[in-house]
Image (cartoon, helix red, strand yellow):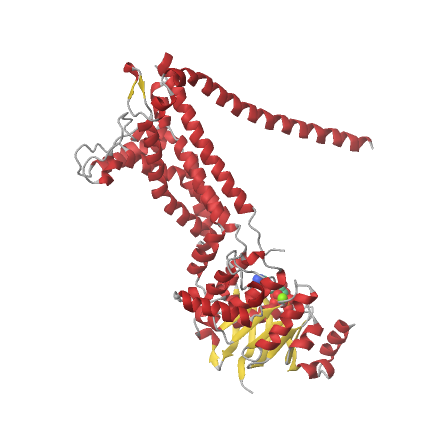
Amino acid sequence: MNTKLETIEFNLYYGDFHALKDISVKIPEKRVTALIGPSGSGKSTFLRTFNRMNDLISGVRTHGDVLIDNVDLFKIDPVALRQNIGMVFQKPNPFPKSIFENVAYGPRVTGLRDHKKLEEIVESSLRSAALWDEVKDDLAKSGLALSGGQQQRLCIARALAVQPTVILMDEPAASLDPIATQKIEDLIHTLSENYTIVIVTHNMQQAGRVSDYTAFFYTDDTRTGRLVEFDETKIIFTNPADKRTEDYITGRFG
Amino acid sequence: MKEKSGRMIADQTVKYILFISAILSIIIVLAIAYFIFRESIQAWKEIGFTNIILKSVWRPGQDQYGILAMIVGSIAVTIGAIVLGVPLALGTAIFLGEIAPKGVQALLRPAVQLLAGIPSVVYGLFGMVVLVPIIRRINVPGNSGYGLLAASIVLAVMILPTITSIAEDAIRAVPDSYRSGSLALGATKWQTITKVVLPAGRSGIIAGIILGVGRALGETMAMIMVIGNSVKFPKPLTANPLTFYLSKARTLTGNIAVEISYATGIHESALFATGVVLFALIIIVNASARWFIKRQSSIPTTRQ
Ligand SMILES: Nc1ncnc2c1ncn2[C@@H]1O[C@H](COP(=O)(O)OP(=O)(O)O)[C@@H](O)[C@H]1O
Ligand SMILES: [Mg+2]
């Protein structure tokens, strides 16, 4: 199996604070990888490394390598990189624009003007995000007028419209009700056929349901985040190598 | 128990005082409006509404009191100030809100705010001593340097702090989640500003511009000093329509301020009618600003 993303001895500092220490991991292509672990263990920080959103935070320093398709990720222009690596945030954040304009936004900023093409992309992205049937008659409606779950699928459609190969999701269902969560999970499963997905989740059942691989992050009194264990999800959940992983997972399942 | 009731009485008293102050300011506004209107009644009756509003000959000696030239003067100078001032103000607001590092902000923001504290007469002096001589060099027959252009430039600087600070507030009120959403899609910082941040803050920005318009319409002293105060209808000096802005003019405010000290009878009443027209214009402008501000704050955000 191909490795899509890889980090080698990756470290990240917020100013003087050592937030991630020596993270080495290989994230397989076209699979779902879940990042789990207690709050503050650096999952979101690690996720933002891949689309270089950490670059926007002042005082962030890193060392160690991050590769995408075996290419040094820090040598790629962040704007180009983010077109290849989409991101879905914890709280749905559609723009205060129409549904159509939300999805067309990415292609437009990359210079696509042809309205016919844009319409095609909007439709196919909304279909891929399992939202098309619910909104196809009302694409001019504001994205903010949708329900929370629909907004999150709109954000997924918006990310897909740029034709990325990787989608990063930071607790994408954290603010959603169980039915909306179910839809997002089904969608993640479908999307994993074509995309490499990395998802942060607090919900162990969710990690178990949606992911093929799981990375367990942990932090101690130093607050520095470390990767304790990375393996196939079924191994992490049934036969983890590290005691801390086992304790966390059994604790979370209660 | 005793302590508590003492505090409750204090609380009640404060509420009462605040209520009285609020009522008082309403009464003052109404009183001013009433007074100006009362003094203008004679003019409306004897000269007639349309003769005042739609005629452009102002000759108090011959009982001609058309203020159309001044209405046009006020509007032209306001448009000029907006055209020159808004891009500058918006640029400054974007720079302060989105681009400038903290240290630069800490220098620039007070500097812009300081512009609001400079007395109007100082702007007028600056216009007379610096701008008018420069504009006079534009080689067009009849150009004295005094006129709509000098007035527009002075006014553009005067409305800069109002528009800048309101627009910056509107820009800052745009949730960060919109910015990260845009950047994560591969938009550049500039695209994020122009395609997401400014549209999302649009209502507040427009409100700022409209408040700037209100300020521009009301400005008096600096206008008197640089606009030339001609009662003639402003016209282009040559075939080139742009030379309209080299024409001298007079604003509604200037009309009142220049003549009120010696006006009597119907002439005085006509000046009050000028004030009523100005009052009405400013009420319309402020009401529309309020409408935009209300729209801005009712925009739902995804913050839950
Ligand atoms: N912008 C930031 N500046 C400084 N410290 C931060 C910032 N973001 C996160 N941190 C710190 O980094 C650590 C990891 O945070 P985060 O990646 O959000 O963890 P998680 O997603 O696992 O809860 C925490 O201790 C957090 O306080
Ligand atoms: Mg997190």
**Residue at 51% across, 61% down:** A139
Residue A160 percent coordinates (x, y):
51, 71
Between A3 and A117, the residue placed more toward the observer is: A117
Q: Looking at the figure, which quarter contains the N terminus of chain B?
A: top right
Residue A16 showing in the rendered view: no
- Residue B160: image quadrant is top left
- Name the residue furthest right: B1
**Residue at 17% across, 38% down:** B139
Between A133 and A111, the residue placed more toward the observer is: A133
- Name the residue furthest top: B265
Q: Going by the image, does B48 lie left or right of A44?
A: left
- Name the residue furthest bottom: A1
Q: Is residue A75 above or below residue A40?
A: below
**Residue at 59% across, 74% down:** A198
Between A112 and A82, the residue placed more toward the observer is: A112
Q: Is residue B195 above or below residue B294?
A: below
Residue B107 percent coordinates (x, y):
44, 47
Count of numbered marks: 0
Image region (quadrant) for ligand 2: bottom right
Q: Going by the image, does B88 lie left or right of A87?
A: left
Q: Is residue A145 above or below residue A109?
A: above
Residue A106 percent coordinates (x, y):
46, 66
Residue A108 percent coordinates (x, y):
43, 64
Q: Looking at the figure, which quarter contains the C terminus of chain B?
A: bottom right
Residue B22 showing in the rendered view: yes
**Residue at 33% across, 25% down:** B67
